[in-house]
Image (cartoon, rainbow, N blue to C red):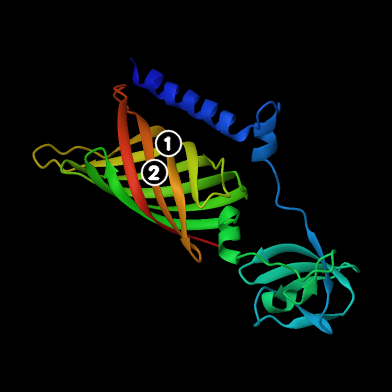
Amino acid sequence: MKPLARMRAPLLLLISAVTALASPPGQAGGLLQRLFAQEDPPQQVEIADPYIELHTGPGRGYPVFHVEERGRWIEIQKRKTDWFKVRTDKGKEGWVSLKQLEQTLSPSGQPTEVREATFEEFRFHRLEIGALGGSFERADTMTAYGAFWFTPNISAELSVAKIFSANADSEMANAGLLIHPFPEWRISPFFTVGTGILRTNPKTTLVQESDRIDQLAHVGAGIRVYIARQFVFRAQYKNYLIFQSTNDNQEIDEWLAGLSVFF
């Protein structure tokens, strides 16, 4: 079987598996609805303290620019660690601390319940960076990556890697799209597909060989495990198809594990 045909099979399996996992039984179009679902709708709360202070940014170092009094309603828009962006009923937007938000009331008149910040942000955050190490076929490799989340179910990722082997030193750069079918799970699986380039520098001494740059494609899967605070353990497998200039395409298996931090 040709390498391209072998790679097509796991790619089709990936698409089928994600569709089956993400689509509710008997509901047409469930995959698209789930993947492009937006954040939870804003929550309305009533101020119970004599007042709350709105800061210009998420931290005590940002100045207070507005004070909202008891009995007024505010809308919680988003969270950043222990700070919340809110909007008043007159349209003013600012940041309120967790301590003050805990002194507000829900529409039912009960104290507002605030969930653990870091695990909720693990489910959906915007940025993540990490470092991984492992094996690229039989060579050691180190990888650094950065990712951006569009929704809880979809993220894009850029990575660079250094590959150490007996015959050559190589550098690799990749861009990929990741699908997270169950972002609310503490041990969350993901699937990925992408493309990139591989630069190979042979270590030959008798015959001088020039560096070679080849295009590649990959499919893969892995898990992300929430540890604590903003730290995540990640393990993954990727299958690469390298389109060599000699028309002798090559398949490579990669296994990686490491740590990442989200923001």
In the rendering, at what x and y percent does residue 184 appear?
A: 58, 50
Q: Residues within 10 Å of mark 2 (few under 14, many from 20)?
A: many
The answer to whether 127 is drawn above or below residue 37 in the figure is: below
The answer to whether any part of residue 199 appears in the image is: yes
Q: Is residue 55 visible?
A: no
Residue 147 placement (x, y as % from top left): 52, 51
Report the residue that reaches farthest toward the top: 1
Residue placed under numbered mark 2 in the picture: 236
The reply to whether the C-beta atoms of the residues labelled 2 and 1 are less than 8 Å apart is yes
Residue in the foreground of this view, choosing between 228 and 164: 228
- Left or right relative to 98: residue 7: left
Q: Amino acid at mark 1?
A: Gly
Marks 2 and 1, Cα distance to the nearest angstrom?
Answer: 7 Å
Q: Secondary structure at mark 2?
A: strand
Q: Amino acid at mark 2?
A: Gln
Q: On screen, 111 above or below 24? A: below
- Residue drawn at point x = 67 percent, y = 72 percent: 83
Quadrant containing the C terminus in the rendered view:
bottom right
Residue at the spot of label 1 = 220
Could you say which is closer to the camera, residue 259 or residue 150? 259
Q: Residue at x 38, y 56 (%)?
A: 131
First in sequence: mark 2 vs mark 1: 1
Q: Quadrant of residue 180?
A: top right
Along the horizontal axis of the image, is 98 left or right of 183? Answer: right
Q: Secondary structure under badge 1?
A: strand
Q: Is residue 105 left or right of residue 187?
A: right
